[in-house]
Image (cartoon, rainbow, N blue to C red):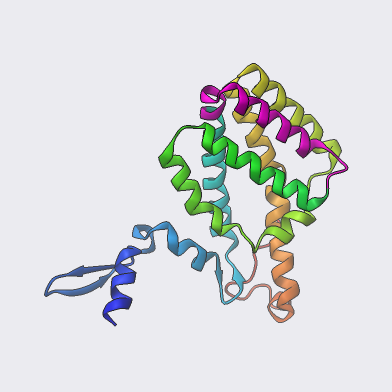
């Protein structure tokens, strides 16, 4: 019991006072660790919380991109443009596309020269893997949508235009936002057809936007 209370205290869910017992705290006081347990509860997707998680992911990645373009050395700029070109290659497999995107995000994080930002990203990233990988493979953007945005990003990185690079990355992140959310809801419904039939029940996936 003491160990369980200590863990809850570490996560910010309980406040323990010496000699005064324990007090439950609201979720808004908790650490980021609890999010992974809140997005999926008993296999049920909380779409609203997932949208908030995607908001935070966008803020982190777009902000890191701006810093990275400002602070990267020439080797990092070259490597980033190579990875962007790989993303745009229509012949790349879905797994290669996802892995290339992860490499690019890792490079952006390193080039930002911001340790706190990297630690924040480390906390958020595990929430997306491995559960979402299959969904991301299904929703790889078609070349005709991806190519213009990757060209914008490549030009911005090459010109060291931090603001333009940030906006291009933001466009990439938002490109499939609704499709990802809807696909996750569909995937959840496929795994639990009884809840899909009773779509208005508490905890059922929210309707598509």
- For this view, does 52 lie left or right of residue 175? left
Residue 17, x across and y down, in percent = 16, 69
Decide: is 109 above or below 185. Answer: above
Q: Residue at x 51, y 46 (%)?
A: 56
Residue 88, x across and y down, in percent = 80, 36
* Residue 17 visible somewhere in the drawing: yes
**Quadrant the N terminus occupies:** bottom left
Residue 32, x across and y down, in percent = 43, 57
Q: Residue at x 69, y 50 (%)?
A: 178
Comparing 114 with 4, the one in front is: 114
How would you classify the magenta stretch by its main secondary structure?
Answer: helix
For residue 166, which quarter of the picture?
A: top right
Question: What segment carries the magenta color?
Answer: 67-92
Comparing 77 with 67, the one in front is: 77
- Asked if residue 37 is among those painted magenta in the image, a careful observer would answer no
Comparing 42 with 64, the one in front is: 64
């Amino acid at each position: 019991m003491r160990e369980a209370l200590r863990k809850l205290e570490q996560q910010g869910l309980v406040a323990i006072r010496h000699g005064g017992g324990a007090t439950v705290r609201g979720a808004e006081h908790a650490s980021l660790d609890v999010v992974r347990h809140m997005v999926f509860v008993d296999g049920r997707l909380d779409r609203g919380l997932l949208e908030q998680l995607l908001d935070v992911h966008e803020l982190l990645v777009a902000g890191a991109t701006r810093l990275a373009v400002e602070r990267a050395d020439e080797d990092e700029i070259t490597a980033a443009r190579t990875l962007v070109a790989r993303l745009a290659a229509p012949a790349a497999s879905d797994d290669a596309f996802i892995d290339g995107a992860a490499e690019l995000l890792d490079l952006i994080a390193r080039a930002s020269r911001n340790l706190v930002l990297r630690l924040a990203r480390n906390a958020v990233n595990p929430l997306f893997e491995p559960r979402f990988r299959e969904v991301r493979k299904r929703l790889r953007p078609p070349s005709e949508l991806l190519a213009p945005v990757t060209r914008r990003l490549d030009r911005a990185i090459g010109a060291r235009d931090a603001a333009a690079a940030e906006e291009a990355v933001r466009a990439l992140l938002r490109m499939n936002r609704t499709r990802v959310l809807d696909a996750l809801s569909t995937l959840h419904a496929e795994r639990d057809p009884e809840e899909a039939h009773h779509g208005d029940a508490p905890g059922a996936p929210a309707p598509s936007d």
